[in-house]
Amino acid sequence: LSPSILAADFSILGEQLREIEDAGAEYVHLDVMDGLFVPSISFGMPLIQSIRKGCSLVFDVHLMIEEPIRYIREFREAGADILTVHYEACSDVRETLRKIRQSGMKAGLSIKPGTDPSVLEPFLSDCDMILLMSVEPGFGGQKFMDSSLDKISYYSSKKAECGYSYFIEVDGGVGAGNAHLVRDAGVELIVAGSAVFKAADREAAIRGIKGI
Ligand code: DX5
Ligand code: ZN
Protein backbone atom coordinates (compact mmCIF):
# COMPACT_ATOMS: atom_id res chain seq x y z
CA LEU A 1 0.00 0.00 0.00
CA SER A 2 1.24 3.44 -0.95
CA PRO A 3 -0.90 6.15 0.71
CA SER A 4 -1.03 9.38 -1.29
CA ILE A 5 -0.41 12.47 0.82
CA LEU A 6 -2.48 14.57 -1.56
CA ALA A 7 -5.39 13.87 0.80
CA ALA A 8 -3.35 14.48 4.00
CA ASP A 9 -3.39 17.51 6.29
CA PHE A 10 -0.20 19.35 5.31
CA SER A 11 -0.11 21.31 8.56
CA ILE A 12 0.62 18.05 10.46
CA LEU A 13 2.23 16.06 7.68
CA GLY A 14 5.10 14.61 9.75
CA GLU A 15 2.65 13.26 12.29
CA GLN A 16 0.42 11.77 9.61
CA LEU A 17 3.38 10.02 7.99
CA ARG A 18 4.30 8.42 11.31
CA GLU A 19 0.71 7.32 11.72
CA ILE A 20 0.52 5.55 8.37
CA GLU A 21 3.89 3.93 8.97
CA ASP A 22 2.76 2.65 12.38
CA ALA A 23 -0.45 1.42 10.75
CA GLY A 24 1.45 -0.78 8.33
CA ALA A 25 2.11 1.25 5.18
CA GLU A 26 5.49 0.52 3.56
CA TYR A 27 5.43 3.21 0.89
CA VAL A 28 4.26 6.78 0.59
CA HIS A 29 2.94 8.11 -2.72
CA LEU A 30 3.94 11.68 -3.60
CA ASP A 31 1.97 13.33 -6.41
CA VAL A 32 3.90 16.10 -8.14
CA MET A 33 1.79 18.24 -10.51
CA ASP A 34 2.99 21.07 -12.71
CA GLY A 35 -0.22 22.78 -13.85
CA LEU A 36 0.62 21.87 -17.46
CA PHE A 37 0.48 18.10 -17.82
CA VAL A 38 -2.45 18.21 -15.39
CA PRO A 39 -4.57 21.24 -14.49
CA SER A 40 -3.52 21.39 -10.85
CA ILE A 41 -0.27 22.26 -9.04
CA SER A 42 0.65 20.29 -5.92
CA PHE A 43 4.20 20.39 -4.49
CA GLY A 44 7.78 19.73 -5.51
CA MET A 45 11.26 18.93 -4.28
CA PRO A 46 11.40 21.14 -1.16
CA LEU A 47 8.44 19.37 0.44
CA ILE A 48 9.79 15.93 -0.43
CA GLN A 49 13.20 16.81 0.94
CA SER A 50 11.80 18.10 4.19
CA ILE A 51 9.64 15.03 4.90
CA ARG A 52 12.51 12.69 3.95
CA LYS A 53 14.20 13.45 7.26
CA GLY A 54 12.77 11.15 9.86
CA CYS A 55 10.68 9.04 7.50
CA SER A 56 11.75 5.56 6.49
CA LEU A 57 8.88 4.79 4.10
CA VAL A 58 9.78 4.08 0.48
CA PHE A 59 9.25 7.36 -1.43
CA ASP A 60 7.08 6.55 -4.45
CA VAL A 61 7.11 9.79 -6.45
CA HIS A 62 4.53 10.16 -9.22
CA LEU A 63 5.51 12.94 -11.60
CA MET A 64 2.58 14.48 -13.46
CA ILE A 65 4.83 16.99 -15.18
CA GLU A 66 5.88 17.72 -18.76
CA GLU A 67 9.35 16.49 -19.77
CA PRO A 68 10.29 15.06 -16.36
CA ILE A 69 13.76 14.23 -17.72
CA ARG A 70 14.68 17.81 -16.75
CA TYR A 71 14.36 17.12 -13.02
CA ILE A 72 15.57 13.55 -12.41
CA ARG A 73 18.66 14.49 -10.43
CA GLU A 74 16.72 16.96 -8.28
CA PHE A 75 14.13 14.36 -7.29
CA ARG A 76 16.86 11.87 -6.47
CA GLU A 77 18.54 14.42 -4.25
CA ALA A 78 15.22 15.24 -2.59
CA GLY A 79 14.92 11.58 -1.56
CA ALA A 80 12.82 9.76 -4.16
CA ASP A 81 13.24 5.96 -4.27
CA ILE A 82 10.86 5.23 -7.14
CA LEU A 83 10.36 7.87 -9.83
CA THR A 84 7.36 7.42 -12.10
CA VAL A 85 6.87 9.45 -15.27
CA HIS A 86 3.99 9.60 -17.74
CA TYR A 87 4.36 8.10 -21.18
CA GLU A 88 2.31 11.04 -22.53
CA ALA A 89 4.65 13.62 -20.99
CA CYS A 90 8.00 12.39 -22.35
CA SER A 91 9.40 13.08 -25.80
CA ASP A 92 12.05 10.39 -25.17
CA VAL A 93 10.58 7.72 -22.90
CA ARG A 94 13.53 5.32 -23.11
CA GLU A 95 16.12 7.94 -22.28
CA THR A 96 14.01 9.23 -19.38
CA LEU A 97 13.74 5.73 -17.88
CA ARG A 98 17.43 5.09 -18.45
CA LYS A 99 18.40 8.27 -16.62
CA ILE A 100 16.14 7.44 -13.69
CA ARG A 101 17.75 4.02 -13.26
CA GLN A 102 21.22 5.42 -13.81
CA SER A 103 20.71 7.90 -10.99
CA GLY A 104 19.95 5.01 -8.61
CA MET A 105 16.15 5.03 -8.47
CA LYS A 106 13.56 2.55 -9.62
CA ALA A 107 11.88 3.70 -12.85
CA GLY A 108 8.10 3.75 -13.15
CA LEU A 109 6.07 4.40 -16.27
CA SER A 110 2.43 5.47 -16.22
CA ILE A 111 -0.43 5.93 -18.67
CA LYS A 112 -3.63 7.93 -18.35
CA PRO A 113 -6.92 6.01 -18.48
CA GLY A 114 -7.50 6.91 -22.14
CA THR A 115 -4.09 5.78 -23.43
CA ASP A 116 -3.88 2.43 -25.23
CA PRO A 117 -1.86 0.10 -22.97
CA SER A 118 0.03 -1.39 -25.91
CA VAL A 119 2.08 1.85 -26.29
CA LEU A 120 4.18 0.74 -23.31
CA GLU A 121 5.28 -2.53 -24.94
CA PRO A 122 8.61 -1.27 -26.25
CA PHE A 123 9.57 -0.06 -22.78
CA LEU A 124 8.51 -2.92 -20.53
CA SER A 125 12.03 -4.21 -19.94
CA ASP A 126 13.16 -0.67 -19.06
CA CYS A 127 10.61 -0.34 -16.25
CA ASP A 128 10.68 -1.40 -12.62
CA MET A 129 7.05 -0.39 -12.21
CA ILE A 130 3.96 0.17 -14.34
CA LEU A 131 1.52 2.66 -12.80
CA LEU A 132 -1.99 2.35 -14.16
CA MET A 133 -4.21 5.35 -13.57
CA SER A 134 -7.75 4.43 -12.59
CA VAL A 135 -8.85 8.08 -12.61
CA GLU A 136 -7.93 11.00 -14.87
CA PRO A 137 -4.71 12.31 -13.23
CA GLY A 138 -4.92 15.70 -11.57
CA PHE A 139 -7.01 15.37 -8.43
CA GLY A 140 -7.61 13.06 -5.51
CA GLY A 141 -11.03 11.86 -4.45
CA GLN A 142 -12.34 10.78 -7.87
CA LYS A 143 -14.34 7.68 -8.71
CA PHE A 144 -12.49 4.48 -9.68
CA MET A 145 -12.79 3.60 -13.39
CA ASP A 146 -13.56 -0.10 -13.90
CA SER A 147 -11.88 0.00 -17.29
CA SER A 148 -8.52 -0.09 -15.50
CA LEU A 149 -9.11 -3.69 -14.36
CA ASP A 150 -8.59 -5.08 -17.86
CA LYS A 151 -5.34 -3.17 -18.17
CA ILE A 152 -4.11 -4.52 -14.86
CA SER A 153 -4.83 -8.08 -16.03
CA TYR A 154 -3.18 -7.34 -19.37
CA TYR A 155 0.10 -6.26 -17.72
CA SER A 156 -0.11 -9.02 -15.19
CA SER A 157 -0.35 -11.75 -17.85
CA LYS A 158 2.36 -10.06 -19.93
CA LYS A 159 4.63 -10.14 -16.93
CA ALA A 160 3.98 -13.84 -16.32
CA GLU A 161 4.31 -14.69 -20.02
CA CYS A 162 7.50 -12.79 -20.77
CA GLY A 163 9.18 -12.81 -17.36
CA TYR A 164 9.34 -9.05 -16.91
CA SER A 165 10.39 -7.81 -13.49
CA TYR A 166 8.17 -4.71 -13.18
CA PHE A 167 5.55 -4.54 -10.49
CA ILE A 168 2.08 -3.19 -11.11
CA GLU A 169 0.66 -0.23 -9.24
CA VAL A 170 -2.84 1.22 -9.53
CA ASP A 171 -3.70 4.81 -8.66
CA GLY A 172 -7.04 6.55 -8.14
CA GLY A 173 -10.32 5.88 -6.40
CA VAL A 174 -9.24 2.73 -4.58
CA GLY A 175 -10.46 1.99 -1.05
CA ALA A 176 -11.40 -0.94 1.16
CA GLY A 177 -14.60 -1.49 -0.86
CA ASN A 178 -12.93 -2.17 -4.22
CA ALA A 179 -9.33 -3.08 -3.34
CA HIS A 180 -10.08 -6.79 -3.77
CA LEU A 181 -10.92 -6.15 -7.44
CA VAL A 182 -7.51 -4.66 -8.22
CA ARG A 183 -5.73 -7.25 -6.09
CA ASP A 184 -7.50 -10.07 -7.95
CA ALA A 185 -6.58 -8.47 -11.28
CA GLY A 186 -2.89 -8.65 -10.35
CA VAL A 187 -1.96 -5.34 -8.71
CA GLU A 188 1.04 -5.48 -6.40
CA LEU A 189 0.98 -1.93 -5.05
CA ILE A 190 -2.16 0.09 -4.35
CA VAL A 191 -2.20 3.89 -4.11
CA ALA A 192 -4.90 5.30 -1.87
CA GLY A 193 -5.29 8.93 -0.85
CA SER A 194 -8.76 9.76 0.41
CA ALA A 195 -9.49 6.21 1.54
CA VAL A 196 -6.56 6.40 3.99
CA PHE A 197 -6.28 10.04 5.06
CA LYS A 198 -9.99 10.86 5.21
CA ALA A 199 -10.81 7.68 7.15
CA ALA A 200 -11.86 8.01 10.78
CA ASP A 201 -9.91 4.86 11.61
CA ARG A 202 -6.77 4.95 9.49
CA GLU A 203 -5.43 1.64 10.65
CA ALA A 204 -8.68 -0.16 9.80
CA ALA A 205 -8.71 1.53 6.39
CA ILE A 206 -5.17 0.34 5.70
CA ARG A 207 -5.99 -3.21 6.78
CA GLY A 208 -9.15 -3.14 4.63
CA ILE A 209 -7.24 -2.06 1.53
CA LYS A 210 -4.53 -4.64 2.10
CA GLY A 211 -7.20 -7.28 2.69
CA ILE A 212 -5.74 -8.46 6.00
C1 DX5 B 1 -4.32 11.67 -9.00
C2 DX5 B 1 -3.18 11.17 -8.16
C3 DX5 B 1 -3.56 10.14 -7.15
C4 DX5 B 1 -4.53 10.60 -6.10
C5 DX5 B 1 -5.22 9.41 -5.51
O1 DX5 B 1 -3.82 12.48 -9.99
O2 DX5 B 1 -2.20 10.60 -8.99
O3 DX5 B 1 -2.40 9.60 -6.55
O4 DX5 B 1 -3.93 11.35 -5.10
O5 DX5 B 1 -6.19 9.86 -4.63
P1 DX5 B 1 -7.49 9.02 -4.29
O6 DX5 B 1 -7.05 7.74 -3.67
O7 DX5 B 1 -8.20 9.92 -3.35
O8 DX5 B 1 -8.23 8.77 -5.57
ZN1 ZN C 1 -0.54 9.43 -8.05
Image (cartoon, rainbow, N blue to C red):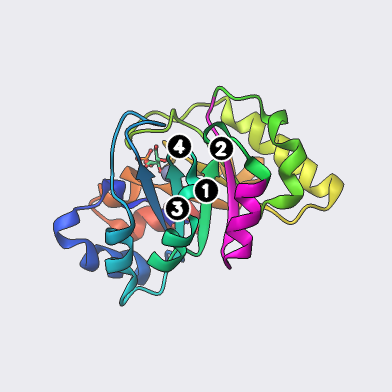
> Do the residues under discs 3 and 1 have CB atoms within 8 angstroms?
yes
The image shows a total of numbered marks equal to 4
Which one is earlier in the sequence, the residue at label 3 or at label 2? 3
Which one is earlier in the sequence, the residue at label 4 or at label 3? 4
Mark 1: give few (<14), some (14-19) or many (20+) Cα within 10 Å. Answer: many
Q: Residue furthest bottom?
A: 54
x and y percent of residue 191 in the render? Answer: 45, 48
Quick check: can you spot residue 15?
yes
Q: Quadrant of ligand 1?
A: top left
Would you identify the image quadrant in which residue 137 lies? top left
SS label for mark 3: helix
**Magenta segment: does it hold 110?**
yes
Write down the residue under mark 4: 66
Give the residue type at disc 4: Glu
> Do the residues under discs 1 and 2 have CB atoms within 8 angstroms?
yes
Mark 2: give few (<14), some (14-19) or many (20+) Cα within 10 Å. Answer: some
Q: Residue at x 61, y 32 (%)?
A: 149
Tell me the tag on residue 69: 1
Query: What's the magenta region?
Result: 95-113
